Image (spheres, rainbow, N blue to C red):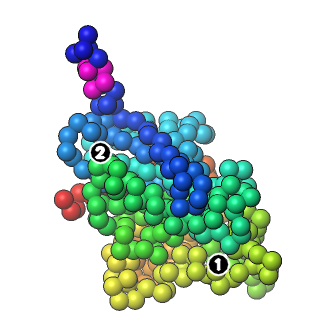
Amino acid sequence: MRSKHRAKKQNDWDASRFEWVLIPRSVLGVPRTFGVYLPEGYGDSTRAYPTLYLFRGAEREWAGSQDRREGLKKLLDRLIAAGVIEPMIVVLPGFMEPSGKSQGVPLNWLADGRSRGVGNGRFEKHFFEIKAIVENRFSVRIGRRHTAVDGFSMGGFSAMYLALKYPSLFASVGAYDGSFMWPGQIDPRRGPHGRGCQLWLSSACAPYFLDDRGWDLRRMERANPISWIHLAEGKRLFDLRDLHVHMHAAGSETLGNVDRCMELDSHLAHVGVVNSFRKQIIFDRRAAHDWSWADRHLEETLPLHDRVFRSIR
């Protein structure tokens, strides 16, 4: 009986799985949860794995089966089993308030978040709390060359914001149809001379930038990935140019965020940062801003992240 029990536990341990990690009292001052995908065989050896941080808004979104998709676990299992990518650990952070009314991005709140269930609202610091827990609790390779970020929609913004602000921490970054900011928060498509961005100057983004005195535009520019591109110099610029970027847009502006993606990519190109998909930034003319296409983007970017991981042992 004892040997059968051990065999069952070993089989359960060998299977790939999601683990949901509770932080009873996070740096926000309230409990938070994040997800971790552990590949088949994790824990049965001393092997260390590279890490991909995958963003959307809430931590469980990528783990779902929206839009008739196969789901993240099956996608990862399939690519690993086929040898398309080596086994990796995938982390699912979440930055949304419990009500889901605000956008979930790793930016610190300007508003008081206590009444909305997010404590002090320091979500950028919370991301680095999650990263430290992952590196201490799980068998991961430590260092820039073993760490990547990717995301969809506002998750694409999150991935690019972190990678462009902290290029010494990440070697590879992907984004599908990111909800990026315009320079100065002025949408050039609105009116003859441009007007304020309706996406970022909205109630969903207000907790990050709006207080009794109005919108803090300087704070918004510090949160703009484009700003961090042009602030880079010296070693930061070297690290930025060494960053592997894999950015896709949806099929058209009516289907997604083509203009925003092309604007950000033009600034990357200006300072010499290569986008793997620059010659075909529109993923597919049929590509929509939905989960099935986000998964197709991920299926293309996972081997590119993996190639970076394999380049340094």
Task: Please tell me whether mark 1 sits on a helix, a strand or a loop.
Answer: helix
Q: Quadrant location of residue 217?
A: bottom right
Estimate the spatial distance between the alpha carbons at disc 2 and disc 1, rounded to whole Å.
37 Å
Task: Please tell me whether mark 2 sits on a helix, a strand or a loop.
Answer: loop
Residue hosting label 2? 87
Q: Magenta stretch: give its range.
A: 6-10
Q: Quadrant location of residue 5?
A: top left
Q: Mark 1 belongs to which amino acid?
A: Met
Residue 126 or residue 16, whichever sits in front: 126
**Above or below, comparing residue 210 to residue 253 in the picture:** below
- Main SS of the magenta part reads helix
Q: Position of residue 280 (x, y in %)?
A: 47, 64
Q: Position of residue 222 (x, y in %)?
A: 58, 80
Residue 9: in magenta span: yes
The mark found on residue 55 in the picture is none
Residue hosting label 1? 220
